Structures are given as structure tokens and as C-alpha cells.
Amino acid sequence: MPLIIITGLPTSGKTTRARQLHAYLAARLGPDGPYRLHYISDATQGVPRRVYDLSPAALPAHVRSANACEKDARAAVYAAVKRALSPRDIVVLDGLNYIKGWRYQLFCEAKNVATPSCVVQVGGGVARARAANEARLAGRVGDGGAEGGGDDGPYERGNWENLVFRYEEPNPMTRWDSPLFTLAWDDDEAQAREVFAKIWDVIAGEGRKVVRPNQ
Ligand code: ADP
Ligand code: MG
């Protein structure tokens, strides 16, 4: 994109949908498709959950500040996107992507390489996302460990609540949050495929916009 920016609350099902979308695109592209497909997430960049934790107690002694920690993480993700992005590379960016200014930056990056971008908002409300995190805290299943940065680990409670508080909803009236697609928690496979097909159309199909840099 084509850059596909996944966004949503913590443990709202982003990675689940990102993986489904990636599989859909891979199948649709086939082995010799005109696009290369990339999947980038905090986990692929080794970014652990705790970088989002602003409580002083969560901070290792050598780190400057909690905020700096998250900024470094964003820089790593940004560099990975920048390396991959081109008109012939489709990047699925799985992550919170909760800051409006950050999504704007990503939009500009795509525009710079003359490739389209879109935002996919995933979720089914705060209560369900919280319950999913609680289930992970209870089981600590698939936890990459505090240092591991796995995609399937829980967030500490305070960190989770704070991220929900800080979350900046995408606004389809802005250029950088559009086109905006939504995938609800309850969407079944057929409904998800419908949304995936619309995303395909915008990034690689008939509906693909011509993007000119810096205009
Ligand atoms: P995120 O990437 O937003 O943190 P995940 O995709 O890892 O969220 O999902 C969090 C938890 O919720 C996982 O245990 C996952 O199996 C479950 N889950 C995600 N999406 C759905 C869904 N649409 N329906 C039911 N369970 C889901
Ligand atoms: Mg995830």
C-alpha cells in the first residue's frame, strides 16, 4: 500500500484480525503477485508491553523516562515501516496506533512514497477488551515475558487502563484516518472477508487511488 494501519484498544482483537487480514491478502496475492506482503508489530520489533506503562514503578533504572521509552519504541516501528513501504509492498501494521499525530505521520510517510494508506479499527468495546486482558493476566498464557515483547502477552492493569484513557479514536473526516474500515468483535468470517475485500479494493484493486507525494 499500501500501508494498512490497524488500531484499537489494548486486547481488542487487533492481532487476531491483523493475522486474518494478512492471510487473506497472502491468499489473494498468490506466490507471484505484484506485491510483497509485510507484517509489522511491536512483537516483530521486540517492543514489550511495558514501554506504554507510564507508572514510575514500571521503569527500569537505566531508562530516562517512561515517555522516552515509548518514543524509542515508536521510532523502531517507524523505521521498520519506512524500510518496507513502497508502492509494491503491502504493509500490515498491527499495533495500538492510538495517537492521532502518529497516524498522521504514518499517512505522510505513505504519501511520500506515493502509496495509499488506510486505517482499520478493530474492537467490541472496553468491557470485552478488558475481559480479554484479565483472562491473559489470569493465565499468563503465551506471555512473551516482561522482556519478550510477545504479541500474546497481557498488559499490567494500570498500563491497560491508562492506554484506554489515552486512546484517540480515529476520525474518518480527517485525511490520515481515511478510508476507515471497522471490524467488530462479533463479525463472523464472512463479514470479515467482506471488509477485507473492501480493503483490497482500496489498496490494490479498482478503487486504488493515485497518490502523489507532497501535495
Ligand atoms: P490485541 O492484539 O488487540 O491485543 P488479540 O488479537 O491478541 O488482541 O486478542 C486478545 C484476546 O481476545 C485473545 O485471547 C483472542 O483470542 C481474543 N479475541 C480476539 N478477537 C476476538 C473475537 N473477534 N472474538 C472472540 N475472541 C477474540
Ligand atoms: Mg496485539
Image (spheres, rainbow, N blue to C red):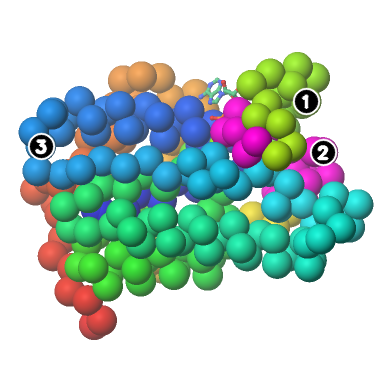
Q: The residue tagged with tag 2: helix, strand or loop? A: helix
Q: Residue at x 40, y 19 (%)?
A: 188
Picture quadrant of residue 190: top left
The quadrant of the picture occupied by the C terminus is bottom left
Q: Residue at x 13, y 65 (%)?
A: 210
- In the picture, measured across the screen, residue 16 lies left or right of residue 69, that is left
Picture quadrant of residue 71: bottom right
The x and y percentages for residue 198 are: 24, 40
In primary-sequence order, the first of circles 2 and 1 is: 1
Q: The residue tagged with tag 1: helix, strand or loop? A: helix
In magenta stretch: residue 121: no
Q: Is residue 77 above or below residue 35?
A: below
As measured in the structure, the alpha-carbon distance from the residue carrying label 2 to the one carrying label 1 is 9 Å
Amino acid of disc 1: Leu
The x and y percentages for residue 110 are: 30, 64
Q: Is residue 123 visible to us here?
A: no
Q: Residue at x 37, y 41 (%)?
A: 39
Q: Which residue is mark 1?
A: 137
- Using the image as rendered, state which of residue 77 and residue 189 is in the foreground: 77
As measured in the structure, the alpha-carbon distance from the residue carrying label 3 to the one carrying label 1 is 41 Å
Query: Looking at the image, do the residues carrying marks 3 and 1 touch, with CB atoms under 8 Å apart?
Result: no
Amino acid of disc 2: Arg
Query: Looking at the image, do the residues carrying marks 2 and 3 touch, with CB atoms under 8 Å apart?
Result: no
- In the picture, measured across the screen, residue 126 lies left or right of residue 92, that is right
- Using the image as rendered, state which of residue 196 and residue 38 is in the foreground: 38
Q: Which numbered marker is on residue 157?
A: 2
In primary-sequence order, the first of circles 3 and 1 is: 3
Q: Residue at x 37, y 27 (%)?
A: 20
Residue furthest to the right in view is 57
Question: Which range is magenta?
Answer: 148-164
The x and y percentages for residue 42 are: 54, 45
